[in-house]
């Protein structure tokens, strides 16, 4: 008898194989095996499925791409190896539990199916899990299901709604996240810079400021209610002081205040803090960090990477402390073993440990350079969390200068104990460790380093969000979770709602339209009717967390959400009728170009285009159709064109320019219109593009069924290989193979 272990990734499977002896087969299912019906399936157009009161919907869970063949191969290996026990070892989170649930149903004909989880891929953790299998956590599964149902309902219905504005999609988390980026850009657009003047001087490599005003002075400088004593509106006044300072070589110390500054270490990494730190210290994008961290986890180097908890295993903390004491000395340790946690934060799930090395005694690892860099950062952060504070001596200084009454002030500080910073020294530079050579005795003269300068500058608008800061904002407001941060930002970029420029996230014109023109249809003065408001999204996330830990009933939460959403959607549709969409307006305006006044009056009457309602626009367009007046492409045609452009990864503006149009709204409708011609061209392009994975899998499956060689099947449509077959040829071949299989079955009967 043999045992089968199923996990998500091949890399993880390779690592685990090393820990298990004979009689163990380890296979990877490559992630999700079954999910809600996707494109190409007969149920793919549904936004939701009905359910009885007190129950969740029971949709037709369908195979994900390639999954059916992968599972067949695993079952084939299992049969050959005489498998008795199946251990499902998918990730220890909501999504992992959902995958485990689907696998438990797929493999339900085996004698024993056991669920095991581990937070780290080490021999001890794996064996402990195998020796202590557990039941499936259906609360986790139901949370995953409700999340899918919510995202499907919002995604399908709202995405369909926004296509009237020629936009591709809306999402439960992605749209509020876009809102942050657009609102910040609006702030920047409306920002009015304010000019100010200040004085730049230094001595002994210490920067000093000159107090130019008291709070109530006429030219005192305030910004957003805050007083800045070293700035002034009066340029001439500041220049006079600069000239007087440049007449002198020295400033004199007339006041000193001593003190110490202690800097505490930060907690071990959570998903968001790891993504931020890698961005800050290594300059990496969040997608790169996520990919490298995933490799480290699968190779058994670090603990699970999707977490918002800062707690860690006591044994791991003891081990890292031994390493610190041995390398740096006892005075680099905290007095007691520090335990970090998230008990007081309701937005933290705290399901898993923080991200840390699985073997804390191993400071460096071999392997790819990027993996070494990220591992080093993770090790440093975990080590630092058990280390003593860094300590700096600090002197607050006040200086005087002959010829001016203004106070000159600054701070001198130098590090006297590095503490936790010693493991981060490679990322820091220019840390001062000695006091200035000139002492701090009152009356000491400090030589000015360079010419004193007048600085004229303007206040800056708020900074754009970076990938790092947007994740901080999402976490702070409770929208999204560790597993969704990277995918949410990637979706916004893929859907052309944001672009990146030198690390900054900038909304595109489409992003602005979605947030400014479309989202208000989903808002109301009533809190629960603000679908894309931050607090509403955060509440939905909290509901999912409550389902996950078994605090609330999944079905009741789902039914309440459906009721709420349907009211919101109805409100949005009603609002939409009150004014025409941009596309409707453009249709009418294009049709009116060159139209005589009398025909215009017949259609429009005394109304102005700018004042018509959405219903009016529909009536006008219908009337023009009756009169057989050429108008713009229909909404269906435009929606189809946009879908085909997205499918083919073609840029809308480039395609329009090639056709001699400045915008898609200039296309004409009807069978003989330019929109119809373009649709035909795009469909032809799509037909001649490479076949989908689903088509390829179908061809391979049917060829196997007929017991013929794949190249013999491809010869039917004159295709060189399965990788070079086009969609059109694949579709023809699938039809032929289906008929052959059907004929074969009839013959057997």
Image (cartoon, helix red, strand yellow):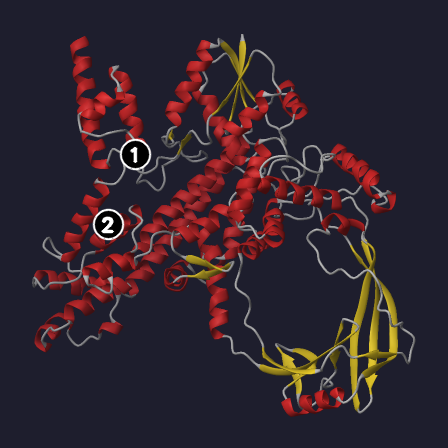
**Residue 187, placed above or below residue 729:** below
| Label disc, if present, on residue 41 of the rendered structure | 1
Can you tell which quarter of the image residue 666 is in?
bottom left
**Residue 494, placed above or below residue 444:** above
Front-lying residue, 346 or 428: 428
Question: What residue is pinned by disc 2?
Answer: 640
| Figure label count | 2
- Image quadrant occupied by the N terminus: top right
The residue at 61%/14% (across/down) is 21
Name the side, left or right, on which 651 lies relative to 358.
left
Decide if residue 44 is in sight here. Answer: yes
Task: Tell me if mark 2 has few (under 14), some (14-19) or many (20+) residues whose alpha carbon lies within 10 angstroms of its own.
Answer: some
Front-lying residue, 429 or 47: 429
- Image quadrant occupied by the C terminus: top left
The label nearer to you, 2 versus 1, is 2
The residue at 81%/62% (across/down) is 414
Sequence order check, earlier mark of 2 and 1: 1
Tag 2's secondary structure? helix
């Amino acid at each position: 008898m043999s045992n089968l272990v199923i996990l998500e990734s091949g890399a993880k499977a390779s690592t685990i194989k090393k820990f298990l002896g004979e009689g163990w087969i380890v296979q990877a299912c490559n992630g999700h095996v079954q999910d809600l019906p996707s494109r190409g399936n007969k149920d793919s157009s549904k936004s939701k499925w009905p359910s009885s009161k007190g129950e969740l919907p029971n949709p037709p869970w369908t195979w994900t791409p390639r999954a059916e063949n992968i599972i067949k191969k695993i079952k084939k290996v299992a049969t050959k190896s005489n498998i008795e026990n199946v251990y499902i070892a998918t990730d220890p989170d909501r999504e992992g539990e959902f995958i485990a649930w689907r696998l438990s149903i797929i493999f339900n004909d085996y004698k024993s199916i056991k669920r095991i989880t581990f937070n780290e891929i080490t021999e001890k953790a794996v064996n402990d899990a195998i020796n202590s299998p557990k039941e499936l956590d259906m609360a986790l599964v139901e949370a995953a299901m409700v999340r899918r149902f919510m995202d499907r309902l919002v995604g399908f219905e709202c995405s369909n709604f926004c296509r009237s504005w020629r936009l591709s999609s809306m999402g439960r988390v992605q749209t509020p996240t876009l809102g942050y980026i657009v609102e910040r850009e609006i702030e920047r657009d409306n920002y009015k810079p304010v000019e100010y003047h200040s004085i730049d001087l230094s001595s002994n490599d210490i920067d000093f400021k000159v107090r130019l005003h008291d709070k109530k002075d006429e030219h005192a400088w305030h910004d957003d209610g805050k007083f800045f004593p070293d700035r002034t509106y009066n340029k001439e006044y500041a220049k006079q002081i600069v000239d007087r300072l440049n007449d002198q070589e020295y400033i004199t110390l007339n006041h000193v205040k001593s003190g110490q500054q202690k800097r505490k270490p930060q907690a071990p990494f959570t998903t968001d803090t790891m993504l931020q730190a890698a961005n800050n210290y290594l300059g990496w994008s969040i997608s790169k960090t996520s990919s490298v961290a995933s490799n480290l986890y699968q190779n058994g180097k670090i603990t699970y990477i999707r977490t918002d908890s800062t707690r860690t295993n006591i044994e791991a903390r003891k081990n890292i402390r031994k390493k610190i004491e041995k390398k740096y000395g006892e005075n680099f340790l905290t007095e007691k073993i520090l335990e970090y946690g998230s008990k007081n934060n309701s937005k933290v799930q705290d399901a898993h440990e923080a991200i840390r090395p699985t073997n804390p005694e191993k400071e460096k690892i071999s392997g790819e350079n990027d993996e070494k860099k990220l591992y080093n950062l993770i090790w440093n952060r975990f080590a630092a969390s058990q280390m003593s504070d860094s300590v700096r001596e600090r002197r607050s200084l006040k200086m005087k200068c002959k010829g001016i009454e203004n106070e000159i002030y600054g701070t001198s500080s130098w590090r006297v104990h590095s503490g936790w910073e010693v493991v981060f020294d490679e990322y820091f530079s220019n840390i001062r460790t000695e006091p200035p050579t000139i002492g701090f005795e009152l009356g000491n003269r400090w030589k000015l380093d360079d010419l004193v300068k007048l600085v004229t500058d303007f206040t800056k608008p708020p900074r754009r969000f970076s990938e790092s800061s947007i994740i901080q904002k999402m976490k702070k407001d409770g929208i999204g979770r560790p597993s969704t941060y990277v995918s949410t930002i990637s979706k916004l970029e893929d859907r052309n709602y944001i672009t990146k420029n030198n690390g900054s996230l900038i909304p595109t014109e489409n992003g602005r339209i979605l947030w400014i023109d479309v989202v208000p249809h989903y808002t109301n003065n009533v809190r629960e009717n603000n679908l894309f408001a931050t607090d509403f999204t955060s509440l939905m996330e909290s509901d999912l967390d409550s389902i996950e830990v078994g605090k609330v009933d999944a079905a009741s939460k789902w039914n309440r959400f459906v009721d709420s959403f349907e009211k919101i959607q109805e409100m949005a549709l009603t609002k939409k009728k009150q004014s025409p969409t941009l596309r409707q307006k453009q249709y009418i305006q294009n049709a009116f170009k060159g139209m005589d006044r009398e025909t215009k009056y017949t259609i429009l009457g005394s109304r102005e285009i700018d004042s018509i309602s959405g219903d009016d626009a529909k009536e006008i367009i219908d009337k023009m159709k009756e009169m057989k007046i050429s108008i713009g492409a229909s909404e269906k045609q435009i929606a189809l064109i946009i879908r085909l452009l997205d499918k083919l990864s073609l840029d809308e503006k480039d395609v329009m320019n090639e056709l001699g149009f400045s915008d898609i709204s200039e296309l004409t409708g009807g069978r003989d219109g330019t929109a119809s011609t373009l649709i035909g061209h795009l469909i032809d392009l799509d037909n001649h593009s490479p076949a989908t994975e689903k088509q390829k899998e179908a061809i391979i499956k049917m060829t196997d069924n007929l017991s013929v060689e794949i190249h013999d099947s491809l010869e039917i449509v004159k295709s060189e290989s399965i990788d070079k077959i086009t969609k059109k040829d694949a579709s023809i071949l699938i039809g032929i193979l289906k008929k052959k299989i059907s004929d074969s079955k009839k013959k057997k009967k």
